[in-house]
Amino acid sequence: MTTRDDALTTLEPPDRLYYATGVFLDAEDLEAEQRYHRGRLARVLDYVQGTGTIAGLRVDYKADKDELEVSAGLAIDRVGRLVELPRIACMDLGRWFTYWKQLNQTLASKASSGAALTEEESSLTGAASRFLTSLSADGSTLFVDVHIRFAVCERGRTPAFANGPWDALDATAPSRLRDGWEVLLTPRGGSDLSLPSKRAWPEATPGEDLGLWQRRMEDHLLGSSWHHGSAAWTGSAPNHDASTEGLDDSTAIFLGRVSIPVSLSGGVPVRSSAPVTVNNHARLFVLPNAALVSWLRAIQGTFRL
């Protein structure tokens, strides 16, 4: 399944298509129409609801299969796009671990012999190095972060005029684009163990007048809560936060941190028999209104709609 770039990761102005009788519309116009409505919805979700898990997407380790499972669910990414996982996603942790271990051994062997790296090996050198450094201070645990990212997937083919500097009588184009997903496993370690940064909101101090606290909240909204087009956004995507450093996609949503017990053999991690654990609660959550009501009732006791 082919994936492609998404226009919502660019800071384009919110231009709407203008209709007039007799105006000729082409593919660019229809793409602009979709981009406007998708972009406005994404902006509302980003600012009104925030970023994080809405429902599901729990990460579990299944010891009998040595797999990580991400349950079906829904989240909002850092540009306001809905990322929906319609079914359980399974990842073979044993194969993942063995791949990176063997890749590091291959790279070390080629480095010592002076052999040239393949193009793929060269592109993976940084990630392979991070695998070796993704350990606790005592070298007993390897940390792996689970992310999910928005992916645009092409669906089906339909006849179309050929594009580009060539001619074809049988040219085709995708007939649909599906808002898809991709689950990522990323080794973490050293200074990369930071967790997703929450948007800071002013907290009321003990005994503070509620009117003064409200004014501080309003000043925060006036001064620092708008982040599009600011220092928080560079080029065609938002800046990386603490949880996405080292990823190609800065909009990926952090789901959980996996701790894999290991021991070191010749400087290379080796799996141990201790259980793998998953931290599902370090992520950001988007709380529905009903959940906020329940929370307020719990802390105030008498809250009513």
Image (cartoon, rainbow, N blue to C red):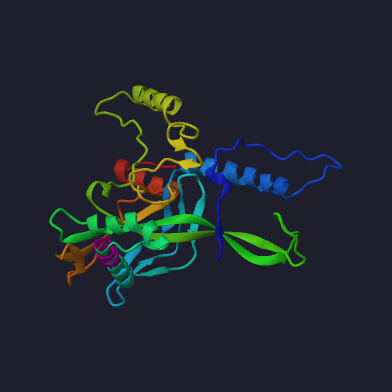
Judged left or right of residue 5, residue 277 is left
Q: Is residue 75 above or below residue 99?
A: above
Q: Is residue 217 above or below residue 186?
A: above
Outermost right residue: 22
Q: Quadrant of the N terminus?
A: bottom right
Q: Position of residue 184 (x, y in %)?
A: 39, 59
Outermost bottom residue: 64
**Magenta residues (range):** 104-112
Q: Position of residue 174 (x, y in %)?
A: 66, 62
Q: Is residue 150 magenta?
A: no
Q: Quadrant of the C terminus?
A: top left
Judged left or right of residue 60, residue 13 is right
Q: Residue at x 19, y 60 (%)?
A: 141
Outermost left residue: 138
Q: Residue at x 61, y 35 (%)?
A: 13
Judged left or right of residue 114, residue 8 is right
Magenta stretch secondary structure, dominant? helix
The total of numbered circles placed on residues is 0
Choose top left, top right, bottom left or bottom right for residue 186.
bottom left
Q: Residue at x 51, y 57 (%)?
A: 151
Judged left or right of residue 32, residue 262 is left
Q: Nearer the viewer, residue 292 or 136?
A: 136
Q: Position of residue 252 (x, y in %)?
A: 42, 51
Q: Residue at x 45, y 25 (%)?
A: 222
Outermost front residue: 114
Q: Position of residue 209 (x, y in %)?
A: 31, 23
